[in-house]
């Protein structure tokens, strides 16, 4: 059974496929504009940790080196329970997952309103996976795919009765493919955006896996119009989703290397 038929069983229904639009992007440029920003523009929790605190999170499948100011509340609370307030861990912290905070939007240089009203993003180790023999190698291998990405959009066809339900008519499904269509190693990510104009929520389903990690996120989408055609422009919903997913994966590659 194909994924479109599987989606129908969950109430998504029948889709008309949008045209493919392929774009080549330079991964190394994704983070360069934001790393030079003044710290007070991206710090969200300046009183929870000493200035310049960086934490090594030892997950079962990899180690991530993350600035404490980029962490989400769930992980901040764990660290406070373990080490106390305003303390920076000096040894690797063993956890199964890590939550990111709103400041990650500034770090990724996201300027289209995605996630500004609501953001829930974290990564966790794939259960049963073995640690990588060389830290960062798998991420760097998969990072090569990020230099070539394509996105397709699926929506209800006008001859489908569901099209006339406002709640369903505005539903959009996106397929992001990393790597060449002809490559056996290409990666497919499916993301849905639902809700009316000005009050939408976007997130992947199923949760994608990236080099030993499960990526989970939900992003509010309150500013961009509901699209009728696919685009890679970051000021459109499909282009904004592509930009966020691509840049977050690029960030994970960088976080495997100590700063």
Image (cartoon, grey):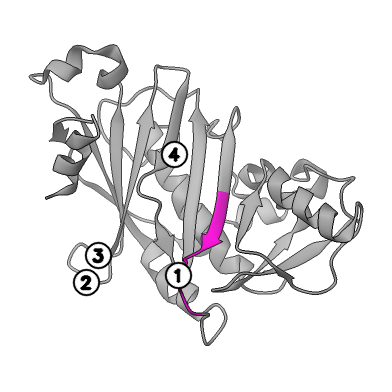
Q: CA distance from mark 1 to mark 4?
A: 23 Å
Give the labeled residue for mark 3.
180
Residue at image position (50%, 80%) is 137
Proximity of marks 3 and 2: CB atoms separated by less than 8 Å: no
Q: Which disc is residue 85 wearing?
A: none
Q: Which disc is residue 184 wearing?
A: 2
Q: Position of residue 142 (x, y in %)?
A: 41, 71
At numbered mark 3, what does the secondary structure look like: helix, strand or loop? loop
| Front position among marks 3 and 2 | 2
Q: Looking at the picture, tell me which residue is in the foreground, 23 or 113.
A: 113
Q: CA distance from mark 1 to mark 3?
A: 18 Å
Which of the 4 image quarters holds residue 164? top left
* Residue 72 seen in render: no
Give the labeled residue for mark 1.
211
Q: Which disc is residue 240 wearing?
A: 4
Using a 10 Å C-alpha cutoff, classify the residue at mark 3 as few (fewer than 14 neighbours), some (14 to 19) or many (20 or more).
some
Q: Looking at the picture, tell me which residue is in the foreground, 37 or 141.
A: 141
Proximity of marks 1 and 2: CB atoms separated by less than 8 Å: no
Residue at image position (19%, 47%) is 3
| Front position among marks 1 and 4 | 1
Side (left or right) of 2 relative to 107:
left
Q: CA distance from mark 4 to mark 2?
A: 27 Å
What stretch of residues is rendered in magenta? 122-130
At numbered mark 1, what does the secondary structure look like: helix, strand or loop? loop
First-in-chain label (4 vs 2): 2
Q: CA distance from mark 1 to mark 2?
A: 16 Å
């Amino acid at each position: 059974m194909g994924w479109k038929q599987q989606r129908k069983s969950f109430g998504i229904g029948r889709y008309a496929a949008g045209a493919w639009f392929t774009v080549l992007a330079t991964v190394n440029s994704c983070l360069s504009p934001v790393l030079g920003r003044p710290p007070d523009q991206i710090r969200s929790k300046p009183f929870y940790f000493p200035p310049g605190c960086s934490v090594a999170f030892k997950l079962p499948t990899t180690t991530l080196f993350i600035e404490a100011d980029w962490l989400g509340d769930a992980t901040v609370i764990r660290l406070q329970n373990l080490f106390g307030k305003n303390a920076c861990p000096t040894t690797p912290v063993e956890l199964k997952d890590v939550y990111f905070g709103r400041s990650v939007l500034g770090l990724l240089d996201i300027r289209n309103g995605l996630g500004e009203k609501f953001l829930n993003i974290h990564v966790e180790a794939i259960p049963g996976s073995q640690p990588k023999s060389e830290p960062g190698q798998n991420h760097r291998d998969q990072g090569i795919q990020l230099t070539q990405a394509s996105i397709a959009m699926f929506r209800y066809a006008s001859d489908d009765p569901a099209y006339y339900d406002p709640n369903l008519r505005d539903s959009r499904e996106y397929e992001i493919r990393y790597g060449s269509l002809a490559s056996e190693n290409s990666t497919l990510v499916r993301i849905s955006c639902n809700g009316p104009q000005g009050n939408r929520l976007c997130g992947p389903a199923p949760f994608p896996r990236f080099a030993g990690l499960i990526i989970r996120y939900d992003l509010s989408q309150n500013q961009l119009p509901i699209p009728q055609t696919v685009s890679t422009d970051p000021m459109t919903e499909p282009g904004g989703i592509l930009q966020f997913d691509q840049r977050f994966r690029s960030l994970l590659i960088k976080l495997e290397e100590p700063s």
